[in-house]
Amino acid sequence: MTALLDVRDVSKRFTLGGVFGRKTVHAVDGASLTLQTETPEIFTIIGESGSGKTTLARMILGLEDPTEGSILFQGQTVRRRMGKDERMRFMSSVQPVFQNPFEAFNPLRQIDRYLDSTARAFLGATDKTVIDAAMDDALQKVGLSLAEIRGRFPHELSGGQLQRVAIARALIPKPALLIADEPVSMVDASLRMSIVNLLKTLRDSFGVSVIYITHDLATAYYISDRIMIMQRGRIVEIGAARKVLETPEHPYSRLLKSSVLSTADAGAGQLAVDPTLLRAASDCIGRPGRLVSRPDGRAVMIHDA
Amino acid sequence: MTDEILRVDGLKAYYQMHYFGVQREVRAVDDVTMSIGRNEVYGIAGESSSGKTSFIKVLAAAVRPPLRVVSGSVNYDFRSGPINVAAATAAEVERVRWKSLSYIMQGSMSVLNPVRRIGQTFHDFAFRPLGLPREAFDRRVLDHLARLKLPADILRAYPHELSGGMRQRVTIGLATICHPEFIIADEPTTALDLVVQKEVLHLIRDIQAEMGASVVFVTHDMSVHANVTDRIGIFYAGRLVEEGPTRKMFFAPRHPYTAHLVASLPRIGDTAQRPSLDGRPPNLAAPPDGCRFHPRCPLAVDKCRIDVPPLVEVAPGQRSACWRWQDVQPLDRSVALAHGAVT
């Protein structure tokens, strides 16, 4: 039995600067995670900007090679250099949804052409009616229709609509794994829940696993099965989403939870951040530590004194 | 409210385009009447293309064609004298800009000039409006940085050397150094991390309380509104659909759109299924007749499809534009009762 995705002790280092003042940045430091084929799940990665969540996603997508460790998708190694057939096979099972829909689409290209070329490439369809049906089917899943998208340019749609088109495009090859990097941060409030609920439907009805990258703890709590919290490239806590978010253990996880703006006491203006939590969390940066398993199934990074 | 700093009356601002003999009109702000008190934080919520950005452009006197103010007035009552920015000349606006009427912008990376040091940017920005001698000006900047909890040596730094949170603090510093009476904050924390966002919001609140300024706070994030604002106005398709004290808007909303916005917020510790709303925001070039929310509204009746509901007072300080406001259910009656929002 092979896992859907197996990330084994992956690290990524970037070197900055030239001959003088060379600096190494540990974007991802020893990350491991496994997704099973039999149990589709929504796996959330949470962390501040610069915590390595996007780099990890890019490595899983085969857009970046890890400096150390390996990534296996359905038993096959994922790497940047793949032959065309191998790449197409891989991309038909793993599809990305990126953060900023305005950057994801070429402003001079009609957006239905992205859907069209995806349908041609992955479904092998050449018949116009088959392609249109596939496009419309995917667009209907995200609350749009081909009739309103056909011939439109990116500037004619709002950010929320564009993001839904990006998700629809990713759904065309019927992938097993969707990697969604901040998919709802640019989406309108009244449509956000429809996308979040859509991710749930994809998991429950179509068996699609989703790696959901975000810094919104409340939606993470709402949809995810498991969660992983990253701080400066390291996994500091990983486990069942609800357990981790209800009783976070690592100082950084606790700081994140305390920073969530609560609506339970609307109008009271609770904005102070506990300085001891802030200090405890920043103390953990750069200190060696190791992930220790807890009886409730989560793993927490314990730092050496 | 007795002491108003801003009074907007029947404001209509449309995008009017005229290309090759074809005329198009987008009614981005359609008949908005509201007021903001002194020392008040007023939140504006609404999704993209709801007209909130066009509305604050009018408030900030930054109307450029094709956007035009068609009718209505925007009256400020500043210490230096009243001004109607919807009709004022460029020179009149110039007199109040930054000194009385200030603006915190969204993307801090594109606001700051990348090839000027922060200290030079402060000089470019505030030296003329403040009109102080060089030495007094420098002292003023240093005092202000201390208040923002920024180290003095950032004046020597370039924008790219600062973190996102620091840059956003610098833009807040630029907007507040002249001690304005009215600040417009347009999504000031949208691009920031959770922890930094909370610190920046706290800073805005502190500065506002210290200087006694009024703030219009625009964001689509309802959890930010819950913690920062005193009152909230909800925009939908170019119209103000509901307005009221923050507490009431969360616990006893009287417009189905507000009720949906509040009910759809997920909370840690609550696993109940959140509703998602069908349909999508209307196209402002061809808005639906009657109430613009009716195609998506669970309470819609025939009347809603024909007649536009007026914004009427439904409770002290709370106004709603809905024919069926009495039927809008607060999200949880027991919670609303505990907060004293309903009786």
Image (cartoon, rainbow, N blue to C red):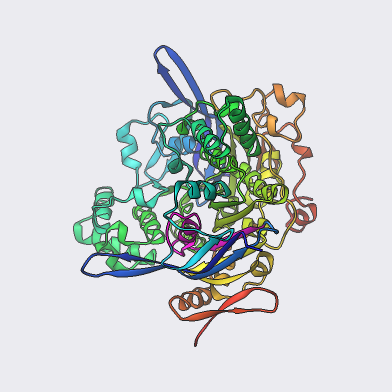
Residue A134 in the image, given as x and y percentages of width and height: 62, 33
Residue B79 position (above or below residue A304)? above
Residue B150 position (above or below residue B2)? below
Tell me which segment is drawn in magenta.
Answer: A41-65
Tell me if I can see residue A229 in this picture: yes
Does residue B211 appear left or right of residue A140 in this picture?
left
* Residue A135, magenta (yes or no): no
What is the residue that sits farthest to the bottom in this orientation?
A305
Residue B327 in the image, given as x and y percentages of width and height: 79, 38
Tell me if I can see residue A185 in this picture: no
Image quarter of residue A225: bottom right
* Residue A60, magenta (yes or no): yes
Residue A283 position (above or below residue A144)? below
Which residue: 52% across, 67% down?
A230
Image quarter of residue A130: top right
Which residue: 27% across, 69% down?
A22
What is the residue that sits farthest to the top in this orientation?
B21
Quarter of the image with the N terminus of chain A is: bottom right
Residue A266 in the image, given as x and y percentages of width and height: 64, 56
Callout count:
0
